[in-house]
Structures are given as structure tokens and as C-alpha cells.
Amino acid sequence: MGDGLQQRLPRIAGLVTVLSPAGAEAEAVARLAWAMFAGALVVWLLVFGAALWAGSRRSQPRSERSGRRIARWLVVGGGMVAPTLLLGALLVYGLLLMPRLREPPPPGADLEVAVTGEQFWWRVRYLRPGQPPIELANELRLPVGERIRLRLDSPDVIHSLWIPALAGKVDMIPGRTTTLVMEPTRTGVFAGACAEFCGTSHAFMRFEAVVTDRADFQSWLEAQAAPAATPSGAAAERGHAAFIGNGCGACHSIRGTTAGGRLGPDLTHVGSRRTLAAGTLANDVDGFRRWITRTHAVKPDALMPEFDMLPAADVEAIAIYLDGLE
């Protein structure tokens, strides 16, 4: 790969650990993790204690019958009864947590998000009753304190959506629709990723979940529903013309223009997103320039072809135009 790893990967902010939860579902998972850690510690202490006790008894004389009786208690108590009780308790505790993890939003909730895992990016659609969906890519915005249902699917291979700080991971299986429910409990930016190997650029399929208060979320959603801004300035106008003229609109959609492609990400407000190419590049003019001309060096096996044959001035103009779509 031509570009250095540190150059290609922008810093994705946010928490990536299940032990610092920011969602109701992640809190339940964290409690289960701590319970399992405690259970593992108990098992370790029992085994270590038994080993120390057995070692201290080796030098002490005892009858054959006494030795067999001790061995029997160790096998039955330590090898059968204790593991059964401990693992059974952990199983019951985990099963009791599951209904909460699957509890749907309350009746009348007006927001549902459909997320499609593709090679190698995320298609995100906000579904609003009685209104057209709002589509974007590689970024998830959520209001704090509200239960949200995510409908997950995939058109190609198995992916798995995981935001460790907010909820557990759920697979996205071709031909099926799975569901993930999450309720963020505090605002912030939280890292997410594909947790199922899905191809060459699996490691470059990241995204961010941005949790804000309801008012900020509603303002953002209304802005995302608007058509693309009119190009401002000669460079942006040239970039728009080059974007349309070179067939980019056959794969990408920009609402308010003639670009209506459905194969690639919707670019209507691409300039407002925090990262580019599913968390792989910084979202700025240089990032767009590199993505257009060095697509496969940045993300191997991406479906988008490289447009390194374009004049440098056209590439620069397209990058400026896309960066301005906020």
C-alpha cells in the first residue's frame, strides 16, 4: 500500500471499551463482564488454593483410604459441583439481562435507523413516519436518553456493527434483517467498527456515533434533510461540473443535483461528516483528493475505481466542491 498507515488513519475520538459504558445496553454488558471476571477470579483462587493445599500435604503420611476420600472430594466438589454452581449462576444472570437488551422503543417513537453494511462502508438511513428517509454514510447521530431501534442488513457478506461504549454487537446477514436497540446515556463521540471479517479492507470500515441532546440532534437532522448547497466560487462550480461530467453521479447521489446514483454513498452533505471513507481519511480537501486518485492504495478492493487519469485541476476542483457540501 502506497500511503503510510499513520497518514491514512485519522484519529477517531471516543471510547472503545465496554468497561466505560455510555449506553443502557452497554452498562448491562459491562455488569455481565465484571460478573464473569469475578467468577473467573473465584475459579482461579479455588484452583490455586487446592494446588497449594495438595502441595503442602505431599510430605504428610496418610492412609490409602484417606487419600482416596480426599481425591474423591476434590474431583466431585472442585470438578463438578463448584463449576456447575458458578457457571449456572453466571448463565442465569446473563439470561436475565437479555430482555432488557432487546426491549424495543416505546410506542409512538418517531425515529428508526436502517444501517446497511457494505464493502467497505456503512449506508445509514433515518426513517421518519410519513416523510422521505434521510440518507448519509459512515456516521451515526443519536439523541441522548432515547431508545433507538437500528435495523441492520447487508447486500454482500456478513458484517457486524459494534459500538462498544453504547451496546453489544449484532451481525448483519445477507438476506436477513437483524435488530439492535440502544439508549445512549450521555453525550459524546464513540468509536464503532465492523466486528466480523468481511474482506481485504475490513480494518478500514470504521465509523463514529455522535450522541447529542435532543435539540442539537433535531437541528442536525433537519439540516441533513435539506438539498445540497449551491456551489460557491469558481473552483466549486468547476468541481460540480467535473463531478457530473465524469460520471460520478452514476454511483453517488447529491440531492438537489442531477446526481442520483445508488451504488455508492450519498454525498449530499459529505463535507459535514467527521471523517471520510469510513474513518480512513480526514474529511478535508486533501482527503478527498487522495480518495479520488488513490482509492485502492487507501482502501484495497473498494468498489470505487481510481480516477487518477483526471487532470490535477479537475481533481482539485472536485475535492473543493465535495468539501463544501456541508
Image (cartoon, rainbow, N blue to C red):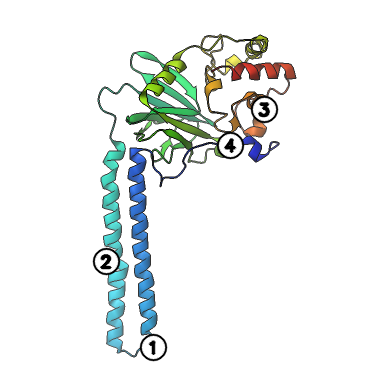
Q: Nearer the viewer, residue 299 or 199?
A: 299
Q: Quadrant of the N terminus?
A: top right
Alpha-carbon distance for marks 3 and 1?
A: 73 Å
**Residue 96 at what x, y percent from top left?**
25, 46
Is any part of residue 39 visible from this angle? yes
**Residue 195 at what x, y percent from top left?**
48, 41
Q: Could you tell which of marks 2 and 1 lies nearer the N-terminus? A: 1
Mark 2 vs 4: CB contact within 8 A: no
Q: Amino acid at mark 1?
A: Ser
**243 left or right of 212?**
right
Residue 59 circle label: 1
> Vertical placement of 266 versus 61: above or below?
above
Say which residue appears at 43% left-offset and 18% top-offset: 134
Nearer to us of marks 4 and 3 is 3
Alpha-carbon distance for marks 2 and 4?
A: 47 Å
Say which residue appears at 55% left-offset and 38% top-offset: 202
> Vertical placement of 26 versus 248: above or below?
below
What residue does disc 4 label? 201
Alpha-carbon distance for marks 4 and 3?
A: 17 Å
Q: Secondary structure at mark 4?
A: loop
Q: Nearer the viewer, residue 144 or 261?
A: 144
Nearer to us of marks 2 and 3 is 3
Q: Secondary structure at mark 1?
A: loop
Residue 290 circle label: 3
Q: Amino acid at mark 2?
A: Val
What residue does disc 2 label? 81
Nearer to us of marks 2 and 1 is 1
Q: Secondary structure at mark 2?
A: helix
Nearer to us of marks 4 and 1 is 1
Q: Could you tell which of marks 4 and 1 lies nearer the N-terminus? A: 1
Q: Could you tell which of marks 3 and 1 lies nearer the N-terminus? A: 1
